[in-house]
Amino acid sequence: QMEVEGMEDEGPSSQSELPASTESKEFSIIITNLQATQQLPADLQSSTPAENVCVNQRAVDKLTEGFLSHYLPDLQNSKRALQELTQNQLILLDTLDQEITKFRECNTLLDLNSLFTEAKIYQNKLVNIRKEMIMLHEKTTKLKKRALKLQQQKQKELLEKEQQRERELERERQLIAKPAKRT
């Protein structure tokens, strides 16, 4: 039989006991998995049958403790670094959302500015159209007055011509010799 002993006589390991927090649960799970999956190298398995191998539990525990003490700090540092990266990513996502909101607000303000500019242009056009309408109204009023004056003047001239003609006819009648009445 092959026994793995001698580990009992070595001094205390760097980790004499596992922490009692949630990490200790992780450690116990890792230890259980290591113990369940622990196998001898292929050349030992072929030379000695599995039932003849005797492994000291204390040696397995110390080897597991040594393995964990060697790799666990790096794994914990990696875990902390990943948590920090995740937290930083969340902060960056929040910041990005805020910046996107700011850009949308800026675009909305630009749209509002262009609308106000457009409204001002159309207001100026309306003011110009109103001025033109007032000017056209004044012109038509003046033209109507002038047309009325011309019509009145024409009627006056026609009336004067008619009166002149009547006077001339009357004068001609008076100038025409009238036979004298015999008495």
Image (spheres, grey):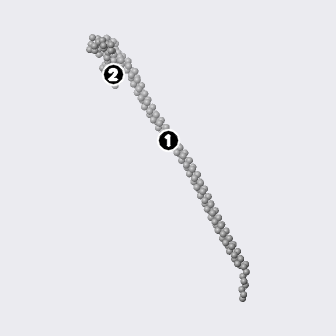
Residue, x 46% and y 34% (percent of image)? Answer: 96
Q: Which residue extends farthest left? A: 51
Left/right of residue 158 with respect to residue 96 in the rendered view: right
The quarter holding residue 163 reads bottom right
Left/right of residue 134 with respect to residue 176 in the rendered view: left
| Amino acid type, callout 1 | Thr
From the image, tell me which residue sits under label 2.
30
Q: Nearer the viewer, residue 23 or 74?
A: 74
**114 above or below 139?**
above
Badge 2: how crowded within 10 Å, few (<14), some, or many (20+)?
A: some
Q: Nearer the viewer, residue 176 or 114?
A: 176
Quadrant of image for the C terminus:
bottom right
Q: Position of residue 116 (x, y in %)?
A: 53, 45
Left/right of residue 25 with respect to residue 82 in the rendered view: left
Q: Position of residue 60 (x, y in %)?
A: 31, 16
Quadrant of image for the N terminus:
top left
Q: CA distance from mark 1 to mark 2?
A: 56 Å
SS at circle 2: helix
Q: Is residue 34 among what the camera can see?
A: yes
Q: Position of residue 136 (x, y in %)?
A: 60, 57
The quarter holding residue 58 reads top left
- Please tell me which of labels 1 and 2 falls first in the chain: 2
Q: Is residue 16 among what the camera can see?
A: no
Left/right of residue 142 with respect to residue 100 in the rendered view: right
Q: Position of residue 107 (x, y in %)?
A: 50, 40
From the image, tell me which residue sits under label 1.
108
Badge 1: how crowded within 10 Å, few (<14), some, or many (20+)?
A: few
